[in-house]
Image: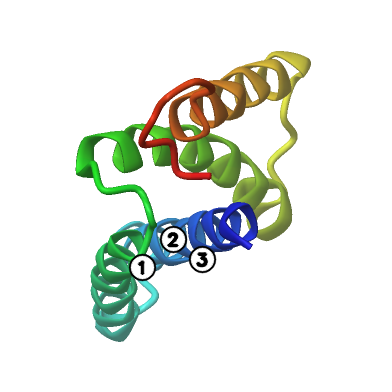
Amino acid sequence: MTVARIIVLFVVAAIAEIGGAWLIWQSVREDRGWWFAVLGVIALGSYGFVAAFQPEASFGRVLAAYGGVFVAGSLAWGIIVDGFKPTVWDYVGSAVALLGAAIIIFAPGRADAAI
């Protein structure tokens, strides 16, 4: 259950943070209206709460691991929402970032490991 919880929380956090940043981008760069920015601020705030529910006790470790999820999530968001066409190097970089995130959060042999 813990591994599933960690993954679900990272996915929800990514949606909140990336979605919030995208909404602000739409407001500022695409002139979509001030309410997009307000929704973006709310989404970004909710990201902080979601991250706080991770079972890992170390803030730094959670945020470092989330960085890899953010990289992959941002590319996925771009593909799904904005029609971004990634290169093979985007995929390779994303995979490396996710591997790094997994190593950080699921570090084998750590007495206080999250799983």
The secondary element bearing badge 3 is classed as helix
Q: Which residue is mark 1?
A: 50
Whole-percent x, y for residue 1 in the image: 63, 63
Report which residue position mark 3 lands on. Answer: 12
Query: Where does label 2 land, which residue?
Result: 13
When the figure is inspected, residue 51 is found, relative to residue 115, above or below; the finding is below
In the displayed structure image, the side of residue 84 where residue 31 appears, left or right: left
Extreme residue toward the bottom, this view? 35
Q: CA distance from mark 3 to mark 2?
A: 4 Å
Question: Label 1 near label 2: C-beta < 8 Å?
Answer: yes
Q: Residue at x 22, y 44 (%)?
A: 59
Amino acid type indicated by mark 1: Val
Q: Secondary structure at mark 1?
A: helix
Q: Looking at this rendering, what residue extends furthest in the front direction?
A: 111
Q: Are marks 3 and 2 in contact (CB under 8 Å)?
A: yes
Q: Nearer the viewer, residue 25 or 13?
A: 13
User: Is residue 89 positioned above or below 47 on the image?
Assistant: above
Q: Are marks 3 and 1 in contact (CB under 8 Å)?
A: yes
Kind of residue at disc 3: Val
The one of 51 and 39 positioned closer to us in this rendering: 51
Residue in the picture at 59% in, 37% down: 72
